[in-house]
Image: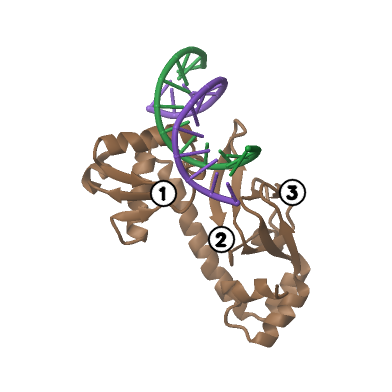
Chain colours: A brown, B purple, C green
DNA sequence: ACATTAAAGGATC
DNA sequence: GATCCTTTAATGT
């Protein structure tokens, strides 16, 4: 496998020349992790982590020690930028959902990189914006009281994103459950309830909205 | 309303 | 075939 894979696939580095990518690659550390491996915990994260292949979940633990999923990283995405700006990670955990390969970049190396290539910060800002946008949406979900309404608004949001009445769930039901702050069992029941009411149709991870008006009215 | 526990049925590697 | 995921039912908060 090529050594500079990370720099090549990361959107924030996309506009750089081949020579620059090689330079960046030289200062990143490459490592493989296995499924289930804990990659960082609060106060144990001082590097920028770039995912090259596989997938990684970012979550926090709620009061009862239950996982609250924040997002699932895809190849090309990164996490840990807060540490680079001296902000301590107080709550985030990361574990590998599959065997994955990733690259890490220390705080000082990254700061050197930023001063050499200021244009990278533009892309960082764009990335922050979308990340914050996703978190804001998740916060909005928790304004609704019942799991059923969270699920309904989540599905409707997906439908807007994917511009279709038929949507693909971006992660497994087990993960969607913790994203919504519930359990797989409850999620399974709520999905079946919505099916029974003929509001949706579900095949594996594909959901077709049959009645969006009534979905919106759930509370 | 939802979580927990246990058990069984599917899916996946 | 083992392991992980999903569903179902019984019971508890």
Q: Chain of mark 2?
A: A
Res A211 seen here: yes
Helix, strand or loop at label 2? It is: loop
Q: Is residue A106 visible?
A: no
Q: Residues within 10 Å of mark 2 (few under 14, many from 20)?
A: some
Asked if labels 1 and 3 share a chain, the reply is: yes
Residue holding disc 3: A43
Q: Is residue A197 left or right of residue A159?
A: left
Quote the CA–CA distance across marks 1 and 2: 18 Å
- Depth check, front residue: A67 or A167: A167
Secondary element at image label 1: loop
Residue at 74 percent of width and 81 percent of height: A23
Pointer 1 residue: A205
> Element under label 3?
loop
The chain ID associated with circle 3 is A
Q: Which quadrant holds residue C7?
A: top left
| Circles 3 and 2 in contact, beta carbons < 8 Å | no
Can you tell which quarter of the image residue A218 is in? top left
Task: Locate residue A144, reporting x and y percent.
Answer: 38, 39
User: Can you give x and y, in whole percent of width and height, for residue A57 in the image?
Assistant: 59, 51
**Disc 3 to disc 2, C-alpha distance:** 23 Å
Kindly report which numbered mark, 1 or 3, lies closer to the viewer in this rendering.
1
| Observer-nearest of A125 and A4 | A4
Q: Which residue is mark 2?
A: A74
Query: Which quadrant holds residue A158?
Result: bottom left
Image quadrant containing the N terminus of chain A = bottom right
Count of labels in the image: 3
Above or below residue A154? Residue A55 is below
The quarter of the image holding the C terminus of chain A is top left
Q: Are marks 1 and 3 in contact (CB under 8 Å)?
A: no
Q: Residue at x 29, y 45 (%)?
A: A201
């Amino acid at each position: 496998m090529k050594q500079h894979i990370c720099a090549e696939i990361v959107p924030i580095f996309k506009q750089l020349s081949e020579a620059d990518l090689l330079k960046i690659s030289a200062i990143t550390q490459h490592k493989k992790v296995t499924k289930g491996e804990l990659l960082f915990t609060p106060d144990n994260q001082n590097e920028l982590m770039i995912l090259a292949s596989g997938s990684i979940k970012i979550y926090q633990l709620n009061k009862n020690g239950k996982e609250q999923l924040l997002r699932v990283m895809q190849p090309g995405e990164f996490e840990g930028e807060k540490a680079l700006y001296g902000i301590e990670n107080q709550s985030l955990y990361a574990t590998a959902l599959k065997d994955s390969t990733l690259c890490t970049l220390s705080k000082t190396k990254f700061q050197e990189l930023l001063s050499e290539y200021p244009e990278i910060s533009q892309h960082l800002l764009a990335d922050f914006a979308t990340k914050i946008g996703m978190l804001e949406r998740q916060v909005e979900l928790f304004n609704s009281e019942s799991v059923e309404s969270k699920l309904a608004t989540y599905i409707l949001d997906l439908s807007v994103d994917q511009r279709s009445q038929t949507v693909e769930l971006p992660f497994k039901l087990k993960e969607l459950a913790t994203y919504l702050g519930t359990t797989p069992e409850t999620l399974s029941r709520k999905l079946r309830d919505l099916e029974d009411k003929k509001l949706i149709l579900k095949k594996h991870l594909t959901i077709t909205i049959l009645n969006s008006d009534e979905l919106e009215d759930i509370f």
